[in-house]
Amino acid sequence: MLTICKHQNIVTLLGFCVEGSETILVVEHASNGYLDDYLFNIKEKPFLTWAKRLKICLDIAHALKYFHHEMENQKTIINCDIRSGTISLDENWQAKIVDFGFSVFLPPNLDGDALHLNCILGHECYIDPEYDETGKLKRESDVYSFGVVLFEILCGRVANDPAYIKESDIGLAFVVRRCFYDETPMEMNQMIDPLIKDECANGYSLDIFMKDAYQCLAKSQEQRPTMEVIIKELEKALSFQTLKENAVVNLC
């Protein structure tokens, strides 16, 4: 898969080595580590502003759009492992998807655009609930996982943080859905990473982001947006944030 994926937001394969029992893939270096590093060890890492986090979200979204709709020869990849631990950050803070361990090809012209698998691929806190229940794997399964990552980035914690796991084995996604279902915006607001709360408070950027991210977590695959729609909304959120920051600079 790495040999055929050519996209700025997907890690580049530089070479490989097969020597005796040693088999090594050589890929570009993640100069700024991985996204989950900034959720586990925030005190030891550079601060990611809200605008920078939005750009990271857009990078991941563009990679997923490429997997789902833009590959050559009508190929489609479902990654099955979108999570903060499989997203690297290069020297320019550009995000790249790096892990293909669970990825599968979706055959062209497949009826219903879904694979039916007997095993469930992925990590528990990120797995599409409809796929988990029925074995039906679709592009929208990646969309769900991406939704979890969006809320990780917003809250500044990994999906399996003990604070979330104590409520449910699926962690962050369960807590987010409960907050929206119970209509407790105050609790959801308290979950936002305090480091960025002042930046994104009382702005259209946050409202657009949260609506977009929550739609990704819909339990039904059919209710989730496409990556094209998600990208448009994230671009809108980033645009509003940029305008807000420019206005602050001008006032100063």
Image (tube, rainbow, N blue to C red):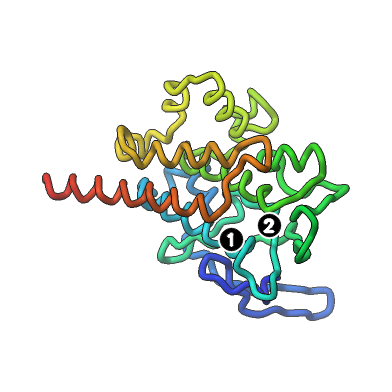
User: Which residue is denoted by mark 1 in the rendering?
Assistant: 97
Q: Secondary structure at mark 1?
A: strand
The CA span between labels 2 and 1 is: 9 Å
- The kind of residue tagged 2 is Asn
Q: Which numbered mark, 2 or 1, is in the foreground of this view?
A: 2
> Around disc 2, counting alpha carbons within 10 Å, would you say few (fewer than 14), some (14 to 19), or many (20 or more)?
many
- The kind of residue tagged 1 is Ile
Kindly indicate whether the residue at mark 1 contacts the one at mark 2 (C-beta within 8 angstroms).
Answer: yes
Q: Residue at x 51, y 51 (%)?
A: 229
Q: In the displayed structure, would residue 182 be above or below residue 43?
A: above
Q: Residue at x 64, y 29 (%)?
A: 165
Residue 247 position in % (x across, y down): 18, 47
Of the numbered discs 2 and 1, the one sitting upstream in the chain is 2
User: In terms of depth relative to the viewer, which is nearer, 129 or 91?
Assistant: 129
In the rendered image, the residue lying farthest to the right is: 118
User: Which residue is denoted by mark 2 in the rendering?
Assistant: 79
Q: Residue at x 78, y 79 (%)?
A: 18
Q: Secondary structure at mark 2?
A: loop
